[in-house]
Amino acid sequence: MATEGIEAVFLETHNWGKAAKFFQALGFELEVSAGDGSGVFRNGEGTYLVVAEVPEDREPGVQVALRVPDADGFRPDPAVEVVIPFEDTHYGTREMTVRDPDGRLWSLQAPIKN
């Protein structure tokens, strides 16, 4: 079983308000606002954009999450280094972390089965 494209992009910012206005000006709609300087945007049926404010002394990062249809059926090829196996998240998915050949970390996300 392979991944199915990009599920979400997690983006950190130093200014939630400016970031929200920027993405809304590009056509994204705010679907969820956590009220703590974070929220989820989406443009139509496209990829989720999760934006969270971080302190000024921290470099803002970006994390890409790839979609996996079934965590239990996913068997990564031996060429894929699993850093953290699938775990349930507080935001309703199962998530695995893998490392690419250049050392970047990637998130794989699958729905939680009910």
Image (cartoon, grey):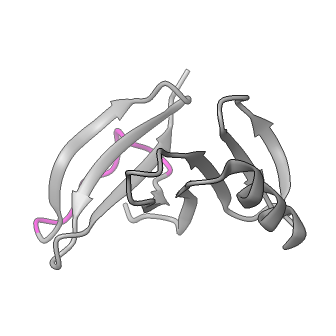
Relative height, residue 63 to residue 87 (above, below): below
For image coordinates 77% across by 37% down, the residue present is 32
Q: Quadrant of residue 9?
A: bottom right
Between 45 and 104, the one nearer to me in the picture:
104
- Residue 111 in the magenta stretch? The answer is no
Horizontal and vertical percent position of residue 101: 15, 77
Q: Main secondary structure of the magenta part?
A: loop
Quarter placement of the N terminus: bottom left
Between 67 and 27, the one nearer to me in the picture:
27
Residue at the front extreme, as displayed: 57
For image coordinates 34% across by 38% down, the residue present is 72
Relative height, residue 95 to residue 69 (above, below): above
Horizontal and vertical percent position of residue 39: 70, 42
For image coordinates 65% across by 30% down, the residue present is 36
Between 10 and 65, the one nearer to me in the picture:
10
Residue at the top extreme, as displayed: 114
Quarter placement of the C terminus: top right
The magenta-colored residue range is 69-78
- Residue 77 in the magenta stretch? The answer is yes
Q: Quadrant of residue 21?
A: bottom right
Q: Quick check: 28 left or right of 82? A: right
